Amino acid sequence: MTTTTAPAPRPPSGIPPARRNTFRSLQRLYPYAQPALPRLYLGMVAALLAGLVALAIPQVLAWLVDGPLSGVGRGSASQIWPAVWIVLALGVVEAIMIALRRWFVLTPGTHIEARMRNHLYARLQDLPVSFHDRWPSGQLLSRAVSDLNLIRRWVSFGLVLLVVNFLTIVVGVAILLWMHWLLGVIFVVCSIPIWIYGYVFEEKYSVIARRSQDQAGDLATAVEESVHGIRVLKAFGRGSFALKNFASQAESLRGTEIEKARAIAGIWLWLLLVPDVAFALCLVAGVWLTSQGDLSGGELLAFFATATVLRFPVESIGFLLSMTFDARTATDRFFDILDTPNEITDPEHPATLVAPLGRLAFDNVHFRYPDSPERFPDLLNGIDLVLEPGETMALVGLTGSGKSTLTALTTRLYDVTAGAVTLDGVDVRALTREELRRHLAMAFEDATLFSASVRDNVLLGRADLAEASPEADAALAQALQIAQAGFVHDLPLGVDTLVGEEGMSLSGGQRQRLALARAVAARPAVLILDDPLSALDVNTESLVENALREVLVDTTALIVAHRPSTVMLADRVALLENGRITAVGTHSELLRASPHYTFVISSLEDEERRESNRAEEAL
């Protein structure tokens, strides 16, 4: 449990940094938005028609002022009503178009978000373990939820209004120039500072927006770590310390959000000030032109009514630009994940094992972690080891010698740096990951369960038993019996009881037994056990080991042993020392021939005695 959160990694995007801009970033959303484009286009058309109808109303008012209203008292009052009905009709049409715009665009946005979220989740499942080792989970969560939600709102609202308001401004300015060129030029010239500041705003706001979203991801990581580590924090009385660190991160995020607000306030200053200045100058010029007879009262009214219609599109540029730049940042963060190269992939022409025998071999295997400094030697430095079909091999070594890492290479959680791991003579890299992991199953010391029923957790590796059936029930019962997990029948709903998030409603030993049952239920050709019995008491461990002997008769097994009793399960023992296998033989042979093995076993016996004493004291 860490109390501080490291900054999120910043992998390079698929677009070179020097060429990246808002348009190029948002253009990458096209594949996800393509199915929704027809409805988005219809929404834009509806919104544009609403804007054009709004621009038509001032022209009716101009005709009304210069026509019927100028003749009131001379029998022309009856001509007012047609204009009133026209304005009413135009208002109704505008309202209908706005309603249609919302109807057209809301649903496609949710579909785009769903496609992106599904693609992101699939990518996270496909990326190697080394990626998840580097990335804080809060950063991934914020991208999958907050960023995609922001993109949806921009597509459904920001994009449509940005395009439509821009076109409305263009059409409106053309109408203003048509009504009187001088007033139109004044209005256009006064708007130039807005576009200049908009360019500056993009450069400034994009940086702040990215920092804000990254800090939000870091804050989500801090919350998640605190929730998962709540037992540790409470046990050590460090809740206030965690709160202090959280408050510090929250304060940093607050400062960034204030900086964002200031940037938005800056552009709003121009968006509110410039139109008012333009209105004042146009009013002075308009009154003068009217006094000179170059402009009628109705035309002057229509000009300002048209300018008023344009006021919302102009003022909306501020929040639409900020929303667009937020969406650009969210898009960049989304593609940070998708652009991450995957070093562990399926071969172009995969091999196939129809009925694997289970011969597992390590041929001159070298491995170093991707982020390991170059000056450090390989963690595994030339491993040579062969497990014959049906053989049980125990792997022993001092803490940190690389035992768990070696087992992870078998299922390609990591790939070897050099050498090869083979299954029945076939390099595991020549198999698809799905097929490889169908033939090999792992049980880890740190047992992870999912928020699902006991049944679903145990049968996770049996896609053929996804549906309830007598075969599924039999496989479940056998796996639970071997793992000595009969306690599940005492749970409120038996095997259909939900175990809760990460199985925290169960004890450590119960979680380990269910994880072991999951590995056994997969019925693999090769079973990899990374000290899966460490949380069990001596009596339960003995029962599990006796049951495992029945399973391991015809299954190849590689067991990482941290207890002498676990070593007794094995046909042979391999000693891992300084990155190499330095001795292989039976337990008794190695005790006679290897002083280092004797030292390792003595260390394990001492630790086992200490655990036994602690258990007795607790009783």
Image (cartoon, rainbow, N blue to C red):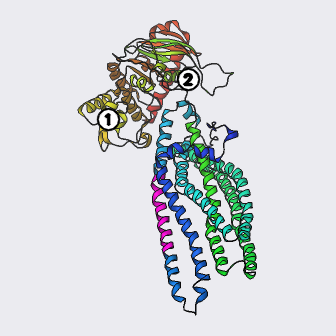
Label ID, residue 441: none
For the residues labelled 1 and 2, the Cα–Cα distance comes to 38 Å
Indicate the secondary structure of the residue bearing disc 1.
loop
Where does residue 552 sit, x and y in percent of width and height? 35, 18
Residue at horizontal 49 percent and vertical 79 percent from the top: 85
Seen in the picture, residue 506 relative to 78 is either above or below; the reply is: above
- Residue 15: image quadrant is top right
* Magenta run includes residue 99: yes
**Which amino acid type is marked by label 2?**
Thr
User: Alpha-carbon neighbours of circle 2 within 10 Å: few (<14), some, or many (≥20)?
Assistant: few
Residue 409 is one of the magenta-drawn residues: no
Residue 565 vertical placement versus 166 (above, below): above
The N terminus sits in image quarter: top right
- Residue farthest toward the left in the current orientation of the protein: 470
Quadrant of res 553: top left
Q: Which tag is nearer the camera, tag 1 or tag 2?
A: 1
Q: Residue furthest bottom?
A: 73
Q: Which region is colored magenta?
A: 89-109
- Check disc 2 and report the residue beneath it: 399
Q: Earlier in the sequence, mark 1 or mark 2?
A: 2
Point out which mark residue 466 bears.
1
Q: Secondary structure at mark 2?
A: loop
